[in-house]
Image (tube, rainbow, N blue to C red):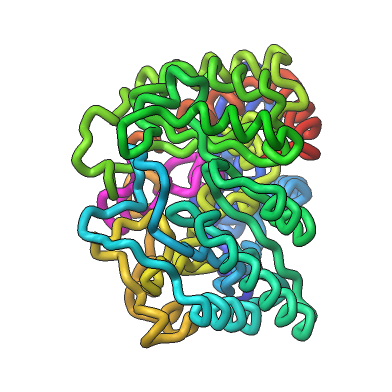
Amino acid sequence: MGAQPSPAASERIAVLERGSKLLVMDRFTGRSVFAPTTSRQVLRLLGTDEDRLPPEVAGVRRKLKAELANYGIGGPLPARSDTLNTLILKLTNACNYACTYCYDYEPEETATTLELDIAISSVTEALESCSKGLQIVFHGGEPFLVFNHIKKIVLAGENVAGRLGKQLIFAGQTNLSRLSAETISFSREHAIHWGFSLDGPTRENDVFRVLRSGGGTHDRFEKALAEFPEFVRGCSAMATITSANYDNLLGISRYFQAVGLRGWDWSLFQPIGRGRSHSQLYFEIDRLIDSWNELFDAVVDGEFDGFAVSPIIKYVDNFINGPGRNMCMRKGCGAGRDLLSISSDGQIEACDCIDPHGPMSNLGNTKLVTLTRAHNSDTAKLIRSRDVEKGVCGTCIWLAVCGGTCLARAQTLDGICEDECQLSLNAFDRISSHLSESTRLSDYLNGCYGSRN
């Protein structure tokens, strides 16, 4: 796909007062620069077409546009690729935990395992269709329950990637309860980067992250950390935010830092799967924002230097470097675009977070259609047509760096998730205000690149 047509400057360049400076941001590329408040009048020239201005004023406008272009503001929009580069394999829907909020468990399901030949043929097709390289994400259920499948998929995938001359990266998400010397050795040998799920200290974690008996699971993490400390500390932690932990983000961050992890990330509770019937899981957005602000202040104060606090970093990174690295925080998210997910029964989804009972689910089944056909399906095309600018995002300065919130969490195709919107508005307000006066956040971000999730 080639470069997109460039919208008028009046539609895409926004100006916001930040203390003693003006933030000038391109709402379509996410690139920005701080300017002195004395440039307010000249910036207004961007809202008038050049051919309607006197020659000498038009020259000033041209010079201004050239200066802004040096910062990536204005001009042609970068080309966007819809080529698949990430494939999630839900190897099994079985799990030895029974987390109350599990978004991947539906009561009508029976235990299934993704057929090995389907998994391998899907990886092969994805490698053949991707442009440069592919990331495979092993998921579940608990993928370590079928680790023999993982070994065969990895070895087959590496052979195909080598033949095609393409890069292949492996990652996965686990609960760490099934680690062994053998699985760790294989993971290291083939550079599989594992993330693990944990909701913080025992008090927060064991409320909803439980066994079928109702007992907590934090002791399983402690056992894994004691037996395989180097491996566990090399993994990425992911906390699901619910009513049990939403008001203690600072405490969670301190806990993960204290046990020697590199950093941590979060995922907000989503009311699908097992969580559909548990209203007690919901958090209060105002208190969550207060908790995020407390964590933000600690990051600014230097408490977490060298420790990747991704609930802060993902916003800071998008603001400073522009969207792209995080496919969930860009206009035109990865769902059905550069990402596809295959469930344990072979069903193809645009994203594994999309409600399987909703209208944007089911792009086809691997037993009947290819990945290419699923990617070109009417449902996938509908998902890619999402246009959040039809609503409040149409005039928001943070459009590019926010992305219009998660498609899977929005109530409608072109709608937004209100909770995520409120979080983003607060985050980018705090970040832009701080960066207008200090390089502290950019220094923190640079210091975490070597250890970020």
For image coordinates 74% across by 80% down, the residue present is 159
Q: Looking at this view, is 188 or 73 the one in front? A: 188
Q: Quadrant of the C terminus?
A: top right
**Residue 381 appears left or right of 334:** left
Q: Is residue 259 magenta?
A: no
**Is residue 144 visible from the viewing direction of this image?**
yes
For image coordinates 60% across by 19% down, the residue present is 255
**Is residue 320 visible from the viewing direction of this image?**
no
For image coordinates 41% across by 50% down, the residue present is 95
Vertical side of 152 occupied by 310: above or below? above
| Residue 136 screen position, x and y as percent | 61, 64
**Residue 102 appears left or right of 401:** left
Instruction: Answer with the quarter of the image where residue 3 lies.
Output: bottom right
Instruction: Answer with the quarter of the image where residue 229 lies.
Output: top right
Question: What main secondary structure does the magenta stretch of the protein show?
Answer: loop
Q: Is residue 403 magenta?
A: yes
Q: Looking at this view, is 224 or 433 the one in front? A: 224
Q: Which residues are magenta?
A: 394-417
| Residue 108 screen position, x and y as percent | 21, 59
| Residue 38 screen position, x and y as percent | 68, 25
**Residue 49 appears left or right of 453:** left
Q: Looking at this view, is 34 or 174 the one in front? A: 174
Q: Looking at this view, is 359 or 219 the one in front? A: 219
Instruction: Answer with the quarter of the image where residue 419 lies.
Output: top left
For image coordinates 40% across by 33% down, the residue present is 209
| Residue 418 screen position, x and y as percent | 32, 37
